[in-house]
Image: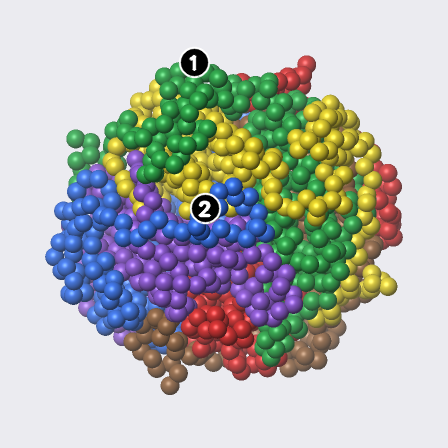
Chain colours: A purple, B blue, C green, D yellow, E brown, F red
């Protein structure tokens, strides 16, 4: 169960509205790695958690913080839109300076939301549930979380240069700091889990089942001409599991045959003229 | 530029068709972490790479391998569908045993593709470009790649238990082994990049800009009641950057105010009856 | 069965082309509450109607009118695009005034449709079936219809201010008038249905089944600090069903426990290190 | 800013797992009118609210409650999946009784989420941002909210009959009661707003602008043969605004001409053979 | 402007309900090549048509017919669902024969639409605007139309075998016959347009502009090992334009270099460690 | 199995960056008929091919070529973005000339991909699997392929006029030439298949089954007033199958009745007040 208080986690106070920036900020609200994604991802991972109370509590701490980050970014977008009006578009027909701005404004922020934040990315594509991850395997999910905060901080740092407005930048700095902590945090969790279970996910897949394919787990196949990739730590030395040595295969050969499928039933209406496949 | 040879990278030879399994295998072809995702992700990362020839070559090696994995999984699905026919559905009306199977068959594999693989997940949702990541920051992308292989291997390992067919399992074992190598490989790349640039992404965001928010980068806020999360390596000791100490905040307080937005222009038709906001 | 005549329901005659406006008008064609939505919504509700001939006929009257509205908005967009050409983009590289326009033009209206209307919203997101509603419950659907016309008229009224073109505005005025009628109309239908069945949907859910939870149906829980919401007609007096009194709960308490789930089978590969859940 | 406590708002305790039901319950979690929709809709409406503190507080009260409802439904789905395993699918090949169940199980709840709730509807389609509404006009949004709770309660009432499990039904009864209150509540808000501003949205669109089209705002056009729709309160009497009388038009005539568009520039490559349009 | 009459174009009368078939029939209503697609495609092509009155009238004839086909398929689905109830799902828990059916039933046809047709395909994915085509080039669109009817008839012919119900089959036969006519019709239109403009689309792209690449327009590159494709009419003889001869290139060579891109600005935060690209 | 070499199939060398053009070029990379579509379409058709080795080899030849075209268009987009920076957006606030450009720049090419190509169309909508076709019927698929190349060449020819940059145009000319060959090629394949099987797809649907509807397969129904469509080769003479004569029906009459559906079970909660349907 959740509760809300009216104050924001951090101050959001824009010096000057900037509707073009408002479009761009949508990316870190409703984009692939926006605040909606981390909010829903951490909440679902927490809700779905079976055992591991320490992690569940951590996920709920951060997931709940992220609901507040969605709130902050919505406030930021709203303030960037303050004073915008549909009439600006009518003026664009007469004034190229206005047209220049309107070309970069998201029309839905005027027509659809009436100066409010939208649940979409910077191109207006709606947020959707396939942006988030909740797999049931903790290490898998922690890697997803580290990755999400990585992309999130990268995107905010690019947005930071898109404005000189000190009010906006102050908010971005708080977001950058929190994305930094969240990177530390998931890294720490990953290190702890890898310590317990090993580095390969899932750890519990029975190794004997994979025995026949053991050698395939250490090879880099050179499928793209040029051997620059040979010069990396993934191509020599012992693997992180300590049980196999990396091997570089300069000229990979196929180990299977060309596939064979049966001729389909006539009710599928392939209209085949050459039925030689299954001969 | 690419070339193709007819043989598969690994053998695909199903002992017995199983159309219900064919539906499920779609998840690792066209799902969020299926072969289509890693194929497109590595190819785009390679195509978009600016500098870093060693990594570009590596991405092209693996991306090209993954086109061949899409090919293998398509062959697997086709063979699992061998012999299926639309008539099975008509028989379902009379025979509950047939109905039991048909309930779990993907109708599009009969009606739309005529026993072929579909570019969709196990529920028939089409693959889409927002499953993949190509950010321009190498460490960010390598974390995405490690994560994708992690989820991919997890899903294949679950699928492995969904059949006793030794032919199918042999193919899964090859996929598991390669997903294992790819985990090792991206881990090695990550370690190398973290060594060079530090663990926080992006490394190049000017630290002085973030100075004012420095303290926010080490705090775990207890937004979810209960303090189990305090018992983790993310809540005590020194952060991975070596310059700050983690802090656990039991009772977080808001640092911002309730947000204020201006009353909108009448042309937005909010029909406000209470215009007190901007007073 | 349907028939078409060449004349439009209302005149569409633009004074001057305006390709930036053409992008924006797409919102009321292929957006969440555009003409495509009401057309498909009323047609499906009519097609799916079981009994209630009076309503079915009404739905078919309006659904058929809306096919003609799609036709009108397509004509409007096409005329706004008259004279546009891909060469304008090439000129944008030299002339900032042209660039200012091209920034706000939908590139697909040049590249994809060749100056025709697109089945998308103002940001180019394709119309999709989850915008529409057909539930089988008449009162539920009438509320959806009132809502759709409400949003539709709101959006057209915002668009109205985006141009001074009297030809365009004349078309918008007809659309505004029809959206007004449709609001009256669905309100009248709703009043009639609420009169018959009561105001709660569905009316037929057996009240005795809900008895144990009866008290929960009248409470406003104060989950967001501050008690301004207490000052509304939803927090005091008797509910619209006449059988319960509203109650304001200042400090809501949880009535459930923290949830418990079983430890999953090892075949799901959660790699749990803490299996205390089911103890 | 938000806070979380571990207990659920209401008890969730399933008597017996039922993975087929778990698939179906997804509809009211991640479907068009599931808990994710009302949660995001009320939060965004609250975050975007400009003025109208009473309503903003109300929206935040209910939006925050709904985050907790997402939590409850996730717990419900997880418990319904307790004990399910990928091996069930392998057994389906041998046992028609198992196959009968597996046909109705969502494969992603095994392969993707590992027995957790998914951010999707009952057919596995991911939740997306175009399910929700936040328009800036309070009456428009309240009508959306009433509609959402209407569809939500309708869907839960249908789900109620899909199980005899008393534990599940108890949870559904709480949800039905809350959806009932929320219908009362939004109805009360609508009545208050209609009282202030009139029943037509938006109220502020200048009526003189619409004068020329005034008569079009009261007509029901008989576009579908048969005159059953004439027998309704929308076809006779005075409109709800008190300023016009409804009119039934038995044989509607077009008031516009067939549309004319210019021949496009050759750079659009229409390859027209008949260029008579603009003559 | 459109009108509707109550009778269907062809009889729809199901002998016996069959809810599993109702799920499957959704494919030809709301799938990629279902009736919604051809309806919207022909209407948009007709609405967007500039000149070419003969074709515009043809498109409106068929587009209007297809609205009636959407109506027919909705009626078919509704009748296939007659008598289904949410209680069937509760019975599935006890009776494997019922479970066998319920596994193949679309849960949304019970929970969401209340036994009505849905605007989705057979897997529940909503219809969307990117299924349809309206390009402004008549020959391009006619090829799309021929293709759509081709896929449509193929899918209906597969569905035909999914039932023995003579009522359902009678409706399918009418659909098959109309899809056959529509194939003839678009073929005839294509032949006429190819006669006028030549077979390559667009005809109007200035050939001199392409001169330098002329030789590339007749070559088949053997990018997949094996030379079976050499044995086809596309690899020898004169092209359909009569001005070039096909050429088979056994061992294609790249004609470009490896691409070069500039090192990005530091504000993009690529964190490059190897900046050799632009040297 | 696939291999990659570093050189591009054709030279890609832009004279001058042009970030507005970079947005537009996305259409032919990740749009409905972009290179991703033909690549995935030909690969899936090839992978799914059952028999017909000559066609399978052809599909693999072209599908493999198209992977290289995706590579080329990615290189083109990257070069068009060379030198762009997030700071340009900050400058837009001060300089209308910069604003004019930024309005037409895709913000995701800065924020998300860091100057790389995106798997989306020109409006930022992600590529998805429902753009492609693989049906199992060769003639059906070849018609799809011809259509895709037709739309592809049309779009590239429109893009060609959007720039004067000779480097860009040289790449477009190669693409135009290849799209031309691919049109020839699929036309040749279609002619061969129609020769073998006849022009109607599927050929194998038993004609006797359709006998009762035979006459419906030759009629053009005049559903849109005006008889211009009568003046075409689809309305007179003998059909392409040589067995029926086209017929123009000036005033089509319905051949079915108004549909009837049963009153639904009370558990569906239609709340019907008029249950006359089944009387």
Residue at (83% x, 37% y) in the render: F252
As drawn, D213 above or below C189? below
Q: Secondary structure at mark 2?
A: helix
Towards the viewer: F219 or D213: D213
The residue tagged 1 is: C208
The answer to whether D42 appears left or right of F188 in the picture is left
**What subunit carries mark 1?**
C
> Looking at the picture, how far across and down is residue F163, in whole percent?
61, 76
| Residue D217 quadrant | top right
Q: Residues within 10 Å of mark 1 (few under 14, many from 20)?
A: few
Looking at the figure, which quarter contains the N terminus of chain F? Answer: bottom left
SS category of the residue bearing label 1: helix
Q: Quarter of the image for the C terminus of chain F: give it.
A: top right
Distance between the Cα atoms at labels 1 and 2? Answer: 45 Å
Q: Are marks 1 and 2 in contact (CB under 8 Å)?
A: no
Residue marked by disc 2: B276
Q: Nearer the viewer, residue C55 or E242?
A: C55
């Amino acid at each position: 169960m959740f509760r809300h208080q009216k104050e924001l986690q951090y101050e959001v106070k824009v010096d000057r509205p900037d509707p073009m920036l408002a479009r761009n900020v949508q990316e870190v609200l409703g984009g692939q790695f926006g605040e909606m994604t981390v909010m829903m991802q951490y909440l679902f991972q927490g809700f779905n958690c079976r055992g591991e109370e320490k992690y569940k509590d951590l996920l709920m701490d951060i997931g709940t913080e992220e609901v507040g980050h969605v709130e902050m970014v919505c406030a930021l977008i709203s303030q960037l839109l303050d004073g915008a009006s549909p009439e600006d578009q009518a003026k664009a027909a007469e004034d190229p300076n206005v047209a220049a701005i309107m070309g970069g404004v998201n029309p839905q922020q005027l027509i659809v939301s009436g100066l409010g934040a939208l649940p979409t990315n910077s191109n207006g594509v709606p947020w959707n549930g396939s942006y988030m991850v909740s797999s049931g395997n903790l290490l898998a999910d922690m890697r997803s979380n580290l990755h999400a905060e990585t992309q999130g901080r990268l995107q905010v740092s690019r947005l930071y240069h898109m404005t000189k407005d000190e009010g906006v930048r102050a908010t971005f700095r708080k977001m950058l700091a929190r994305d930094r902590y969240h990177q530390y945090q998931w890294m720490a969790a990953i290190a702890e889990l890898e310590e317990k279970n090993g580095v390969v996910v899932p750890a519990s897949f029975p190794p004997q089942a994979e025995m026949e394919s053991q050698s395939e787990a250490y090879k880099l196949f050179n499928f793209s001409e040029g051997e620059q990739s040979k010069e990396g730590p993934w191509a020599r030395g012992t693997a992180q599991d300590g049980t196999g040595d990396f091997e570089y295969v300069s000229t990979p050969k196929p180990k299977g045959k060309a596939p064979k499928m049966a001729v389909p039933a006539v009710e599928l209406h392939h209209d085949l003229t050459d039925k030689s496949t299954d001969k």
